[in-house]
Image (cartoon, grey):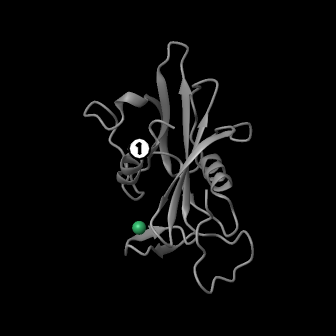
Amino acid sequence: MTAAPQPLGSSGPLGSSGDGWAFCSQGHKHWGIYGAAGLLVRHRTTDGTDLVLLQHRALWSHHGGTWGIPGGARHLGESAGEAARREAAEESELETAPMSEIDCYVDDHGGWSYTTIVVYVDEALPVAIRGGESVEFEWFPAASLGTADGPVLHPGFADTWPHVSTL
Ligand SMILES: [Zn+2]
């Protein structure tokens, strides 16, 4: 895993908020001055069904009403794993401390990246929301994602899912 490139002239103290827009070298506008990260929480049931925890995004948010993973902008000097856990803890009552990172996927656009941190949990317990960015959290069968019967995915997560579905 490589650290997100820092913008030239960045001089904020360690931990400075990364809230703000950034442009990648492909010309897109992205949220997160120092890149962004999200937490993909998975569980495998005893009968072998793969489940994925998704966040139903608040209607007012960007692509509101779609389903994605909790996440957001990285702070200056913050690792993707730290950022993903912090954001998940701000948006839900997930206990992220005991989670160990299994894998990660970096979508590097050049000058900006989104890192998906993959963790597995022992139980697919109900997850309550925290803050105003979520409507609910729900477990979905991994096999339903990206299908007509599955949840309507946030376009960013829809692009990422094929790369992380087997992690
Ligand atoms: Zn981009």
> Which part of the image, by quadrant, shows the N terminus?
bottom right
Which residue is labeled 1 in the image?
161
Where is residue 119 drawn, in percent x and y?
61, 38
* Residue depicted at 44% across the width and 66% down the height: 109
Task: List the single residue furthest toward the top.
Answer: 47
Q: Is residue 92 visible?
A: no
Horizontal arrangement in the rendering, residue 138 relative to residue 98 (left or right): left
Q: Nearer the viewer, residue 77 or 95?
A: 77
Q: In the rendered image, which quarter is residue 140 located in? A: top left
Task: List the single residue furthest toward the front.
Answer: 1
Where is residue 53 drawn, in percent x and y?
51, 35
Q: Relative to 164, does residue 42 appear above or below in the rendering?
A: above
Q: Nearer the viewer, residue 6 or 131?
A: 6
* Residue depicted at 64% across the width and 38% down the height: 94
Q: Relative to 19, does residue 54 appear above or below in the rendering?
A: above
- Name the secondary structure under disc 1: helix
Where is residue 156 drawn, in percent x and y?
39, 54
* Residue depicted at 64% across the width and 70% down the height: 17
Horizontal arrangement in the rendering, residue 162 relative to residue 37 (left or right): left
